[in-house]
């Protein structure tokens, strides 16, 4: 790396002065951390206008500015269909905003698309319609209905098979612009693609769409987020800044007792949005990111880069003079001040593809313990086993997401665990308690870092650089402060028969403010008069999208049958063309003896929105169904499994095939919505093909899950490394009501 560039970066870090005026002002280097601005529900509703657009002058946090795509958000103005926030009311900070909801709320959003065209996005070649930069909205981790509007008078729920198009943009990229693409283009192939849509089951709306998402009265209290989920552009749009936080309930709702609630309320609470942005020397944001933008560690002998690393030339591109910014709430190297009564940090990895290996380091280079409070929006429960057994069980249940130890301050109560490192792949959320060590009488200077992390062996996967993300000032601990707090119970509550994951299904029906149970939805006959048009430009997809009669149980799909007793589903993360760098998912059913049922096999292939890979019928009256899924990574790099509309438990994968199904890991309560899927220890024989796995050449570890299903509708499961998702590592799942 040229010494001149390193010297310039060092001088920049010294010279920039920290200034902060308001959440809409420019954020500067080394300022105190600023929490995202909050929009809180009122009287059971949060009604917002959300405008996706390109904005100039976005502060990079280092004294320079760039253009980004962000959401401008304001409370919905009066008027039936506003498309602009009243002057001075919109929020669009670089770190995003936070939507504060309560159980039982309705979240209403009018999402307006004012994005510019994007003719040079990688996947425009596969789907020329993407050149117009359509978008949509996903409430990640929320246990809500994937409701599809039943007509232009209806609202959408968390339904990702929707394109909101920008009317001013072309819907098809001219063939002449193909040369601007960052990958080789066959003009004849492109011309053939340009005459048709590759997503015929996508609903389409011009300009804006109306959403209504109901938060159930049993919904877990915790940290979630929202982002676009338009297949082929998810990477570009999230990378460019389109994301924000959602919180349900109060932070202290994770507590088991009043003492815990008092401790949390007395201490500080921070939401930390981790985000990376690559800015070329020209000042242009690189929304098709390059993992080799800079080196994994600085050449100066330091352990990590300070907030950013300088671009370099590699075998594919020259990023010399560019900066790879790593921000917390849109700030570079902010200072997080932890008071005498500690902090709760609620952290989100809002990066599109990069993973973080987080640790809080003291001046001596020792990782400080952080009490683990919640994972993916649900509080954790370590049970009552002895300390050594507790750590073993929790480590299995976390499946590589953390390095755990007994909390140093706990005595006889073995129900709490601490982490010395946290692995956060894209979309992960973790909540931890931070405080100074017992007995410290002076403030301690620490730093929040992400270590270098390789997702594959050298030459495969990505090399994510080591970065210091924030400075941390730890005040001496108050004399009356408990070292650990008692949390947990939410996972067991969610998995109960009356809990958010397994209670009988409910459906949104016309005329009702909240969803109703399946028998009531089946019997309801709306008046169908005086309907107000909400989505006036709506063009709904062909009948390949779910038929309302199937949704309500008035008809059935003969191909939609429950798993036989003892059977499980095996999901294969692989390459459609073995040995190449492409992405797809495969599927096969496995019987009770561990044998694959060949007639059920679906080859590893890229996402096809017209195909339903898995269909799950609910039980009578909409009672939830539990399934066992097994994840197998056939490739030579790690992936990150995510499924919409539900949660899952990690099971004991050591149970041999041919014996009983794996059981829940004893004495642990952890629910995930994303999970690392590791490659084989020796991945040299893993070319991404099912054949390599079946032959015994590729031997990755199995990841076995228990997944409850109760949300009726069409949704997806995929790798949440968005480069992989956009590249095809996604499949469609359908849950239907039972035949009445």
Image (cartoon, grey):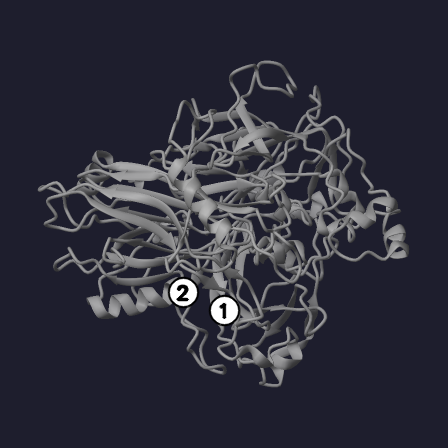
Quarter-wise, where is residue 218 in the image?
top left
Quarter-wise, where is residue 478 in the image?
top left
Q: Which residue bears the numbered disc 1? A: 678
Q: Are marks 1 and 2 in contact (CB under 8 Å)?
A: yes
Q: Residue at point 21% right, 34% down?
A: 266
Counting the numbered discs, the total is 2
Q: Secondary structure at mark 1?
A: loop
Q: From the top left corner, tell me how far across and down residue 107 is, in percent.
A: 51, 31
Q: Residue at point 34% right, 38% down?
A: 270
Q: Residues within 10 Å of mark 2 (few under 14, many from 20)?
A: some
Q: Residues within 10 Å of mark 1 (few under 14, many from 20)?
A: many
Q: From the top left corner, tell me how far across and down residue 482 is, in percent.
A: 14, 46
Q: From the top left corner, tell me how far across and down residue 410 is, in percent.
A: 15, 56
- Residue 125's label in the rendered image is none
Q: Which residue bears the numbered disc 2? A: 400
Q: Eyeballing the image, is 468 above or below 147?
A: below
Q: Quick one: 64 or 638, which is closer to the camera?
A: 64
Q: Residue at point 60% right, 63% down?
A: 562
């Amino acid at each position: 790396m040229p010494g001149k560039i390193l010297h310039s970066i060092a001088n920049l870090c010294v010279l920039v002065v920290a200034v902060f005026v308001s959440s809409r002002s420019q954020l500067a280097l080394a300022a105190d951390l600023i929490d995202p601005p909050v929009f809180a529900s009122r009287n059971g509703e949060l009604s917002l206008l959300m405008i996706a657009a390109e904005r100039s002058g976005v502060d990079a946090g280092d004294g320079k500015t760039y253009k980004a795509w962000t959401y401008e958000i304001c409370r919905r103005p009066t008027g039936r269909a506003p498309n602009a926030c009243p002057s001075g009311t919109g929020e669009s900070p670089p770190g995003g905003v936070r939507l504060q909801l309560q159980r039982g709320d309705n979240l209403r959003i009018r999402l307006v698309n004012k994005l510019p065209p994007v003719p040079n996005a990688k996947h425009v070649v596969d789907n020329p319609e993407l050149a117009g930069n359509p978008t949509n909205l996903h409430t990640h981790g929320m246990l809500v209905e994937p409701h599809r509007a039943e007509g232009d008078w209806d609202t959408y729920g968390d339904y990702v098979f929707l394109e909101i198009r920008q009317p001013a943009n072309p819907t098809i990229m001219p063939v002449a612009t193909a040369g601007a693409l960052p990958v080789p283009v066959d003009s004849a192939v492109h011309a053939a693609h340009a005459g048709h849509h590759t997503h015929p089951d996508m609903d389409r709306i011009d300009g804006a769409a109306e959403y209504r998402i109901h938060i159930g009265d049993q919904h877990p209290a915790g940290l979630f987020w929202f982002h676009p989920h338009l297949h082929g552009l998810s990477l570009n749009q999230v990378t460019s800044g389109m994301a924000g936080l959602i919180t349900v309930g109060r932070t202290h709702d994770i507590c088991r007792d009043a003492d815990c609630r008092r401790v949390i309320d007395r201490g500080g609470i921070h939401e930390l949005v981790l985000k990376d942005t690559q800015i070329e020397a020209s000042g242009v944001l690189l929304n098709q990111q390059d993992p080799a933008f800079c080196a994994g560690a600085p050449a100066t002998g330091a352990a990590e880069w300070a907030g950013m690393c300088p671009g370099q030339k590699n075998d594919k591109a020259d990023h010399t003079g560019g900066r790879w910014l790593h921000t917390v709430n849109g700030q570079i190297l902010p200072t997080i001040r932890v008071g005498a009564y500690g902090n709760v940090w609620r952290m989100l990895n809002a990066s599109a593809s990069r993973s973080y290996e987080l640790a809080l380091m003291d001046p001596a280079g020792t990782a400080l313990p952080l009490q683990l409070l919640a994972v993916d929006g649900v509080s954790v429960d370590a049970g009552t086993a002895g300390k050594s057994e507790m750590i073993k069980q929790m480590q299995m249940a976390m499946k590589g997401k953390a390095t755990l130890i007994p909390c140093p301050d706990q005595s006889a109560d073995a129900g709490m665990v601490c982490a010395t490192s946290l692995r956060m792949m894209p979309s992960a959320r973790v909540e931890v308690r931070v405080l100074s060590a017992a007995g410290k009488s002076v403030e301690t200077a620490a730093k929040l870092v992400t270590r270098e992390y390789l997702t594959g062996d050298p030459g495969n996967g990505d090399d994510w650089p080591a970065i210091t993300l924030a400075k941390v000032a730890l005040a001496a601990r108050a004399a009356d402060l408990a070292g650990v707090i008692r949390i947990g119970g939410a996972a067991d509550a969610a998995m109960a028969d009356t809990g958010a994951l397994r209670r009988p299904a409910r459906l949104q029906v016309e005329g009702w403010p909240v969803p109703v149970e399946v028998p009531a939805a089946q019997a309801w006959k709306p008046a169908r008069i005086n309907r107000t048009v909400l989505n006036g430009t709506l063009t709904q997809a062909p009948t390949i999208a779910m038929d309302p009669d199937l949704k309500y149980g008035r008809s059935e799909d003969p191909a939609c049958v429950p798993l036989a007793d003892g059977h499980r589903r095996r999901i294969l993360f692989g390459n459609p063309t073995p040995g190449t760098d492409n992405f797809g998912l495969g599927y096969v059913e496995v019987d009770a003896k561990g044998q694959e049922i060949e007639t059920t096999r679906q080859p590893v292939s890229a996402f096809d929105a017209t195909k339903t890979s898995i269909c799950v019928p609910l039980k009578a009256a909409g009672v939830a169904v539990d399934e066992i899924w097994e994840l197998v990574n056939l490739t030579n790099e790690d992936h990150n499994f995510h499924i919409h509309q539900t949660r899952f438990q990690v099971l004991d994968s050591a149970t041999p095939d041919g014996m009983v199904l794996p059981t829940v890991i004893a004495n642990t309560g952890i629910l995930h919505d994303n999970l690392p899927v590791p490659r084989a220890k020796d991945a040299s024989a893993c070319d991404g093909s099912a054949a390599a796995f079946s032959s015994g050449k590729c031997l990755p570890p199995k990841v076995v899950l228990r997944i409850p299903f109760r949300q009726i509708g069409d949704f997806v499961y995929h790798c949440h490394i968005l480069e992989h998702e956009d590249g095809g590592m996604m499949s469609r799942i359908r849950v239907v009501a039972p035949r009445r």
